[in-house]
Image (spheres, rainbow, N blue to C red):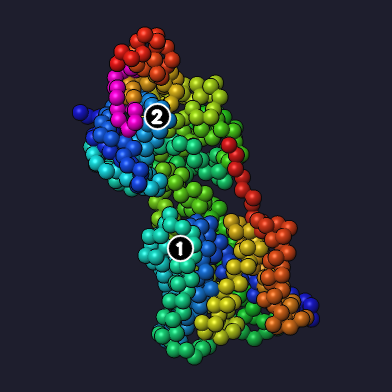
Amino acid sequence: MFQQVLFSGMALGSIYGLVALGFAVIFKATEVFNFAQGMFVVCGAYLAVTAIAILDLPFPVAVLFVLVMAALIGAVIQSTLIQPLAGRPILAVIMLTIAISIVLRAGIEIAYGPPARTLTTPMPSGGFAFMGLMISKLHLTAALVSWACVILFGLFFRYTSIGLLMRATADSHEAATISGIRVNTMNRLAWGIGFTLAAIGGVFLGQLQIVSTELESIGLLALPAVVIGGMQSIPGAVLGGLLVGVIEQLAAAYISPKASDVAIYVLLLAILMVRPWGLLGQRGINRV
Amino acid sequence: MSALLSIEGLSAGYHRKGLTLEDVTLPIGKGRIVALLGANGAGKTTLIRAVSGVIDLHGGSIMAGRATFDGRDVTRMSADRIVRLGMGQVPEGRLVFKTLSVEDNLAVGAAVLPRGRRTARLDAIYQLFPRLAERRKQAAGLMSGGEQQMLAVGRALASEPRLILIDELSLGLAPLIVKAIYDQLKVIVAEFGTAMLVVEQNARLALQYCDEAHVLERGRIVLSGTAAAVAGDPKIRESYLGLGEARQGDAA
């Protein structure tokens, strides 16, 4: 039983980690605490519904459609809504992200109607027994794809020259500007990536559950995940997501499904008391 | 007339605070070191910010006048574009990328260059500042102030600029290190022909290295000339170099 719960916790946690990574990329680049990240997850699920059930695209094209649209929407949100508020008090920007999520929710409910949709893709389903565990193929795929995305992003961020420019921009907008970096382009890129990672998470959550705007609350688990991991830390977000997934499943299995959110926030509180900057966050290196 | 950078009648200020800079005219020729001297609050930093396009990041703007760089009007152009045109900057407070390594800091500076030219440029910078080569892998935020200043100069230089604006290089650094960096600025001008606008509170220091100097007081240029002429001016000797005789104090 324990291993079984651990497995589904890790699988779900991998998706949360992916969504949290998207949140962290946006936060690191633009210092925006994005309350719309949960809704971005929902958008991803509905993009998949659009591509597969409505447009009836072949699966690989559908995947491409979801990725491109997600990146585009993220970039457009940044340039039309977030960027004009650059330099304004942080509270205004946070309120704006809440507004974005409300508008997205309403837009989706108007366009697709209130009833939930099911999302079926050619991804492997069913399950197999492995060392006494019942392994769901969809959970396993979700975890593997999430990890592939995380690693791919990590390599991009650490080893490519655009990744370097993104890290420089995240370090200091002014220093980046006077080094000739197009800061706005980098910020758009960060929002595009952040939205896309959330959307990928949404495609899996939509299949594991059902596609409706209620998925937002699952997407918003990215918030405790990044706080646990350390706001500024990219690996921290992934680790935080994993922890949230495992705790959620353990609490649901051993206490009550109603207890999972409580357990997550108890963990959050406990970690913040010992390490207010999160597990992998930094207290900041400042000198001179 | 064929100045590399020509600033004409430039006025700038921060919102709600009136003009910080009034009607400033200042030409910088190719390969020249031009010093801008003045006390705290005279508007030196504002001039750099206005010319380099970052003034809006600090809540200010250009009210009048224009800046022409290499024949192109750069007034109110976006800061990153001005850098890509060949005007680098060593900002007040150095502003190195603290979380990035020395190597990465320089790589960011060189990123505007075509790929093929980057390595040679970075090698040249490591030769100018061997200290940076020793610290290649170190996070910039963990280095000493002097090393960070070298890095800021190196990063500005990495984009092969034709002009570098340098803001208060000596601030908070030990005199020996400041001298070492200024010596390297001379080498940079000789080797690469890079022109420099050096903003400096320490007039004595700047006048040793510059070709021409301008003195800014309360946002206006009150004196311009060759380094020797400015250094010989009685008022400058009195209030900036501390050399004037008491009797001559009010002569101007």
Residue A267, position in %: x, y? 72, 68
Q: Nearer the viewer, residue B170 or B141?
A: B170
Residue at which label 2 appears: B199
Instruction: Provide the residue span drawn in magenta.
Output: B216-231
Q: Residue at x 31, y 18 (%)?
A: B226
Q: Residue furthest bottom?
A: A115
Residue at which label 1 appears: A92
Amino acid of disc 2: Val
Quarter of the picture containing the N terminus of chain B is top left
Q: Nearer the viewer, residue A128 or A193?
A: A193
Quarter of the picture containing the C terminus of chain B is top left
Q: Residue at x 44, y 20 (%)?
A: B205
Q: Nearer the viewer, residue A147 or A46?
A: A46
Does residue A213 lie above or below A30 as drawn?
below
- Residue A212 on the magenta span: no
- The answer to whether residue A26 is visible is no
Amino acid of disc 1: Ala
Q: Is disc 2 surrounded by few (<14), some (14 to 19) or many (20+) residues within 10 Å? A: many
Does residue A68 lie above or below B230 as drawn?
below
Quadrant assignment, res B217: top left
